[in-house]
């Protein structure tokens, strides 16, 4: 087993396909997630993706792109496969060589599936809101703070808007945005393209200048067992965000204070965290955004989600909705149109509205993936702090 693993690692470490030894169909385009001068993975005109792997000693090579694709080897030892057409958006993938799973050396690697994975980013025609443009740019700053909950130093990614360093007296509202399960504070900073989205919105006058704080929502505590959407896990996250993250930000950055100047949002697991923490603490957050959460149902691995009880989770939300209407400036929920979470989410939206709760709802083409979440941030940010 050790010899086989070493052999596979040897094969992958020498993987390289360049312009001189690969025969590519006309019109193919190298993907922006490729590194160095690698042509592949590459995109065909109909959104099929061509993969090539130089592994002459391998017995079997596959690409796992959510669907497993078997590759075929030519006489030079180059393995090739062309996938089905892919929907626009962000897709993680892995190479599987003789049964062992690897990130593709031809691609950048991203933390987003509980481990480092390769990815392709299929462009969406006409969607340039997350494309770098010639506008004033803010910065994403990677900083460390001390977590009182965990008793360790942790990382934060903080977006400061264009002009932040030029005016030492100007203060800004703050959006706290959370990643999903299997991700961390790198998700919104890298895959989510938060800085580019905000730069473009601010330049277009569609969003106010704001600070965006991207924290690691995976919170543990010695002696405490917690996970998923249960009260214990949500209490730990609330303790972390309100007891350590917000005090750090408001001490070290020119952040406006008060509920009206704070927003909390997140995707999937982070959407559940935003729902619990935001709606249970309207004295701290007057703006709540929930993207693609499984809290309301639609995922089989979430026990009890199909029977989600909004009133028990957020007391008063159905019996006294006006109190939330008075305290919340923005309550926003979104989900992908092909996400199995959409029907339970839409059902809850209907319940909320039938009781008189003000909630904004949006759906976007796509399943449970970054293109939906980028669009959710783009939409949500335009509604904040106005």
Image (cartoon, helix red, strand yellow):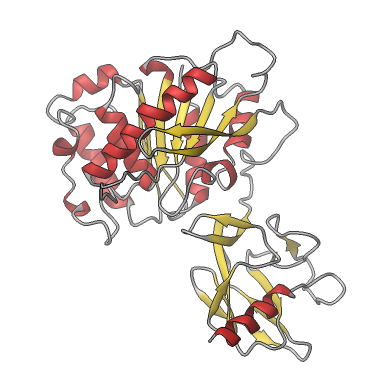
Which residue ends up furthest to the top in the rendered image? 169
**Quadrant of residue 329 within the rendered picture:** top left
Please name whichever residue, 63 or 252, is drawn nearer the observer in this view of the structure.
252
**Quadrant of residue 347 within the rendered picture:** top left
Q: Residue at x 75, y 75 (%)?
A: 14
Q: Is residue 111 visible?
A: yes
Please name whichever residue, 247 or 44, is drawn nearer the observer in this view of the structure.
247
Please name whichever residue, 321 or 355, is drawn nearer the observer in this view of the structure.
321
State how many labels appear.
0
Q: Is residue 147 above or below residue 168?
A: below
Q: Is residue 256 left or right of residue 39?
A: left
Residue 276 percent location from the top left of the image: 28, 36
Q: Is residue 360 visible?
A: no
Q: Residue at x 32, y 32 (%)?
A: 239
Q: Is residue 227 above or below residue 209?
A: below
Q: Residue at x 59, y 86 (%)?
A: 4
Please name whichever residue, 346 or 295, is drawn nearer the observer in this view of the structure.
295
Residue 31 percent location from the top left of the image: 70, 59
**Quadrant of residue 303 within the rendered picture:** bottom left
Q: Is residue 349 left or right of residue 338?
A: left
Residue 321 percent location from the top left of the image: 19, 25
Q: Residue at x 69, y 28 (%)?
A: 137
Residue 218 percent location from the top left of the image: 39, 46
Q: Is residue 317 left or right of residue 149?
A: left
Q: Is residue 366 above or below residue 214?
A: below
Q: Is residue 52 above or below residue 114?
A: below
């Amino acid at each position: 087993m050790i010899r086989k693993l070493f052999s596979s690692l040897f094969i992958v470490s020498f993987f390289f396909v360049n312009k001189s030894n690969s025969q590519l169909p006309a019109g193919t385009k190298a993907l922006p997630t490729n590194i160095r001068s690698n042509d592949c993975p590459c995109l065909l005109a109909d959104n099929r993706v061509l993969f090539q792997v130089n592994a002459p000693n391998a017995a079997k090579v596959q690409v796992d792109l959510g669907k497993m694709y078997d590759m075929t080897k030519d006489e030079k030892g180059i393995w090739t496969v062309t996938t089905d057409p892919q929907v626009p958006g962000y897709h993680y993938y892995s190479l599987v060589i003789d049964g062992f799973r690897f990130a593709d050396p031809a691609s950048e690697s991203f933390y987003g599936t509980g481990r480092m994975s390769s990815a392709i980013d299929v462009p969406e025609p006409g969607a340039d809101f997350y494309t770098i443009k010639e506008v004033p740019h803010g910065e994403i700053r990677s900083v460390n703070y001390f977590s009182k909950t965990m008793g360790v130093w942790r990382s934060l990614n903080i977006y400061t808007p264009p002009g932040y360093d030029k005016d030492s007296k100007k203060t800004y509202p703050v959006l706290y945005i959370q990643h999903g399960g299997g991700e961390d504070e790198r998700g919104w900073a890298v895959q989510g393209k938060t800085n580019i989205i905000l730069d473009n919105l601010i330049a277009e006058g569609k969003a106010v200048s704001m600070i965006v704080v991207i924290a690691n929502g995976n919170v543990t505590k010695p002696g405490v067992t917690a996970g998923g959407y249960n009260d214990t896990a949500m209490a730990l996250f609330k303790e972390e965000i309100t007891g350590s993250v917000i005090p750090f930000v408001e001490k070290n950055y020119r952040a406006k204070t008060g509920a009206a100047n704070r927003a909390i949002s997140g995707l999937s697991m982070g959407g559940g965290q935003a729902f619990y923490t935001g709606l249970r603490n309207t004295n701290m957050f007057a703006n709540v955004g929930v993207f693609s959460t499984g809290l309301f149902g639609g995922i089989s691995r979430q026990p009890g989600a199909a029977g989600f009880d909004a009133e028990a989770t957020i007391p008063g939300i159905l019996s006294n909705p006006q109190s939330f209407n008075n305290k919340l400036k923005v309550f926003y929920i979104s989900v992908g149109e092909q996400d199995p979470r959409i029907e339970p989410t839409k059902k809850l939206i209907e319940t909320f509205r039938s009781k008189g709760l003000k909630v904004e709802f949006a759906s976007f083409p796509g399943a449970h993936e970054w293109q939906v979440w980028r669009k959710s941030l783009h939409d949500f940010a335009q509604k904040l702090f106005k």
